[in-house]
Amino acid sequence: MADADIKGLKADIKRRMDGALDVLHKEFGGLRTGRASINLLDPVNVNAYGSEMPMNQVGTVSVPESRMLSIQVWDKGLVKSVEKAIIDSGLGLNPAVDGQMIRIPIPPLNEERRLELTKIAGKYTEEARVAVRNVRRHGMDELKKMEKNHQISEDAHHQYADEVQKLTDDCIGKIDETLANKEKDIMQV
């Protein structure tokens, strides 16, 4: 019984830590680095049909060239809403409307904006680290409970606690590596 519980607990901890890393990758995808990426518009929601909808649910986002995004809006009545959402997003983008096609040139980043983006990336990274630490804390609490209920021995508790710590250290290492790569990407001229 305890072995199955431990395996399930470790799998759950790993899954939740990987989830924190996935969220970080998605947040980093929305940070503008001076190159076009369809993920750039992920955080932008459009007021459509009486509710807020993600950009990819109102049109097709594509990258026709390295410094240009385009959105083929499916519903002609939403073109103005999409344009307004992009302008109001705070990403510093100026869309150009051409019928149902919206073209968005990606301007080069200035030094001040690059530094601001690295600070934002650092904030996202710290949120991911905190999420991983919370998962670790939850896992450690579960191990204590199992030991207290005599499901595992004290030695087993220490062994599994070491494994949970190793999972945590590995995940934090991946998070730090992801931040270093993103900072390098942002600061490239």
Image (tube, rainbow, N blue to C red):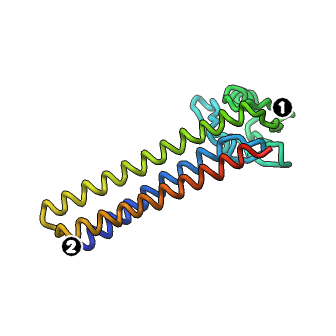
Q: Amino acid at mark 2?
A: Met
Q: Position of residue 6 (x, y in %)?
A: 28, 68
Q: Position of residue 148 (x, y in %)?
A: 13, 60
Instruction: Using residue 98 as the reference point, say whether residue 24 is left or right of it.
Output: left
Quarter of the image for residue 43 reads top right
Residue at x-position 32% and y-position 67%: 8
Q: Position of residue 93 (x, y in %)?
A: 76, 32
Q: CA distance from mark 1 to mark 2?
A: 62 Å
Front residue (pair 188, 147) = 188
Q: Is residue 156 visible?
A: yes
Above or below for 151 versus 125:
below
Above or below for 179 versus 159:
above
Q: Is residue 77 visible?
A: no
Q: Position of residue 76 (x, y in %)?
A: 77, 34
The quadrant in which the C terminus is found is top right
The residue carrying mark 1 is: 97
Query: Of the numbered discs in the image, which one, if any, rests on residue 1?
Result: 2
Q: Amino acid at mark 1?
A: Val
Quarter of the image for residue 71 reads top right
* Pointer 1 or 2: first along the chain: 2
- Could you tell me which secondary element the residue under label 1 belongs to? strand
Front residue (pair 47, 115) = 115
